[in-house]
């Protein structure tokens, strides 16, 4: 059984205790739309295993993240016409992580979105 945290907002989303716009669910991974999108289609891919930092997450969960991220990317390409995107993953407060449950951002990029360069968009 994967670790879960009682009061973690993303664990609550995984448990369906708070609603989300789900894009994908596998045994170890959950993906959904960001509630405050930086651009249309901004999505989050998370391990079901609770952990604050990437190094807290077991390798078998991490192994499902990248294929799941690719599936969400393909869905966004088909569904929204997305072509370009940033994948972003913040670890710790100094790195601008606000939700302490590992998450990978998929941020669709369009020519004049005004978001700046990759490491400066969040
Ligand atoms: P961080 O800065 O921690 O890398 O990003 C956290 C992201 O989670 C933010 O983009 C924020 O909009 C998103 N977020 C925070 N709370 C919720 C929520 O309850 N539901 C959803 N769908 N996204 C959330
Ligand atoms: Zn959690």
Image (tube, helix red, strand yellow):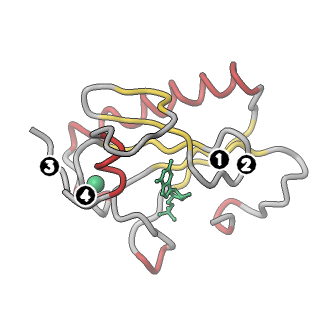
Could you tell me which residue is drawn at 44 percent across and 41 percent down? Answer: 45
Q: Earlier in the sequence, mark 3 or mark 1?
A: 3
Which marked residue is nearer to the observer: mark 2 or mark 1?
A: 2
Residue designated by label 4: 51
Asked if the residue at tag 3 contacts the one at tag 4, i.e. Cβ–Cβ closer than 8 Å, the answer is yes
Crowdedness near tag 3: few (<14), some (14–19) or many (≥20) residues, C-alpha within 10 Å: few
In the current view of this chain or complex, which residue is farthest to the left? 1
Would residue 68 appear left or right of 12 to someone viewing this image? right
**Residue pointed to by mark 1:** 107
| Mark nearer the N terminus (1 vs 4) | 4
Q: CA distance from mark 2 to mark 1?
A: 7 Å
What is the distance, in whole Å, between disc 4 and disc 3 at their CAs?
A: 8 Å
- Compare marks 2 and 1 and give the one earlier in the sequence: 2
Mark pair 3, 1: CA separation:
27 Å
Count neighbours of disc 2 (C-alpha within 10 A) and say few if under 14, some if 14 to 19, many if 20 or more: some
- Counting other residues with Cα less than 10 Å from the Cα at mark 1, is it few (<14), some (14-19), or many (20 or more)? many
Image location (x, y in percent) of residue 114: 85, 60
Q: Residue, x 50% and y 45% (percent of image)?
A: 44
Residue at the image position 74 percent from the left and 31 percent from the top: 82
Residue drawn at point x = 35 percent, y = 65 percent = 100
Q: Secondary structure at mark 3?
A: loop
What is the quadrant of residue 119 in the picture? bottom right
Q: CA distance from mark 1 to mark 4?
A: 22 Å
Q: Which mark is residue 38?
A: none
Confirm if mark 4 falls within 8 A of ligand 2: yes
**View extreme (right): residue:** 112
> Which quadrant, please, contains the N terminus?
top left
Residue 59 percent across, percent down from the top left: 22, 43
**Mark 4 to mark 2: distance in Å?**
26 Å
Tell me the residue that label 2 is attached to.
Answer: 39
Q: Residue 110 location, x and y as percent?
A: 83, 44
């Amino acid at each position: 059984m994967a670790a879960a945290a009682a009061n973690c907002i993303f664990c609550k989303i995984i448990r369906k205790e708070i609603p989300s716009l789900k894009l994908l669910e596998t045994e170890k991974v959950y993906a959904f739309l960001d509630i405050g999108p930086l651009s249309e289609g901004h999505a989050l891919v998370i391990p079901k295993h609770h952990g604050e930092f990437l190094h807290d997450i077991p390798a078998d969960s991490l192994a499902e993240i990248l294929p799941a991220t690719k599936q969400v990317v393909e869905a966004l390409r088909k569904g929204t016409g997305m072509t370009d995107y940033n994948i972003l993953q913040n670890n710790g407060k100094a790195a601008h992580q606000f939700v302490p449950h590992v998450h990978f951002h998929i941020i669709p990029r369009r020519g004049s979105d005004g978001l700046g360069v990759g490491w400066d968009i969040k």
